[in-house]
Image (cartoon, rainbow, N blue to C red):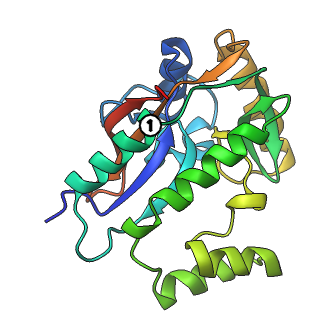
Amino acid sequence: MSSFQRYAIYYLPDDKGLADFGAAWLGWDVRTGKAVPQLAVNDIEVFTSTPRRYGFHGTLKPPFVLSDGKDETSLRNAVAGFAALRPPIALEGLSPAVIGHFLALVPDGPVERLAQFAFDCVRAFDDFRRPADTAELERRRAAGLTQRQHALLRQWGYPYVADEFRFHLTLTGQLDEEQLAIAKSAALQHLPALPRPFHIASVALVGERSDGRFQEIHRYALTG
């Protein structure tokens, strides 16, 4: 019996300053699976209510329920094998940016290697994913997907993969323009010096607990 409701493959910052900032910004430390005091920013609990449960991360393989016949041990072994064959990825840096209606940190410069790496994650662990049920598919479709996103949802259980993927470290939920301006100003005041270059040198297997919050299970260095 699995101890988690769902699993995912995340990038969790290896830079302690950035990881500590993300935990304090969201009020949840995905590394330890514990709540932490949130930064003293007006309305931050409202701004971060959606991403808080996931922790500060970049998604590589979106959350999934384990398929029948699979277990956590076999998944852990698969992630370890995957990481052992992949080298770290170097990017120019990170910068805050607005994506649609939410605030995030996004990579600077070319991201082709990262995009390919993320899609490799999606494909490599898809045998572990139980196909989405009708309710989940309808919930996703209600967001107003494009034809391409519909196709990706049917094939991979998530609409924002492959050519629809954009790597980001989420800072807020959906906000209006005024809220985004306040959140971005606050983030700029509290952000540590962002790494330049920015290296992705590990991946993390995370699990969703019964309370709906995610926590790190194990982190794997990219050593290929």
Q: What is the residue that sits farthest to the left in this orientation?
A: 1
Packing grade of label 1 (10 A; few <14, some 14-19, many >=20) is many
| Direction from residue 103 to residue 110 in the image, left or right | right
Name the one closer to the observer, 187 or 208: 208
| Residue 50 visible in the displayed image | no
Q: Judge left or right: residue 201 versus residue 206.
A: right
Percent x, y for residue 120?
58, 52
The residue positioned farthest toward the top in the image shown: 193
Q: Quadrant of residue 157?
A: bottom right
Please provide percent x and percent y for residue 219. Answer: 36, 32
* Residue 165 or residue 209, whichever sits in front: 165
Q: Position of residue 3 (x, y in %)?
A: 18, 57
> Measuring 69% from the left and 39% from the top, which residue is drawn there?
114
- The mark tally for this picture is 1
- For mark 1, give the secondary structure: helix
Q: Is residue 22 visible?
A: yes
Nearer the observer, 95 or 126: 126
Q: Is residue 143 above or below residue 24?
A: below
- Seen in the image, is 155 located left or right of residue 74? right
Quadrant location of the N terminus in the rendered image = bottom left
Q: Which residue is mark 1?
A: 83
Depth check, front residue: 181 or 172: 172
Q: Amino acid at mark 1?
A: Ala
Instruction: Give how far across and how far down residue 163 sits, in percent.
Output: 78, 59
Query: Which residue is pictured at 54% across the width and 61% down the height?
Result: 123
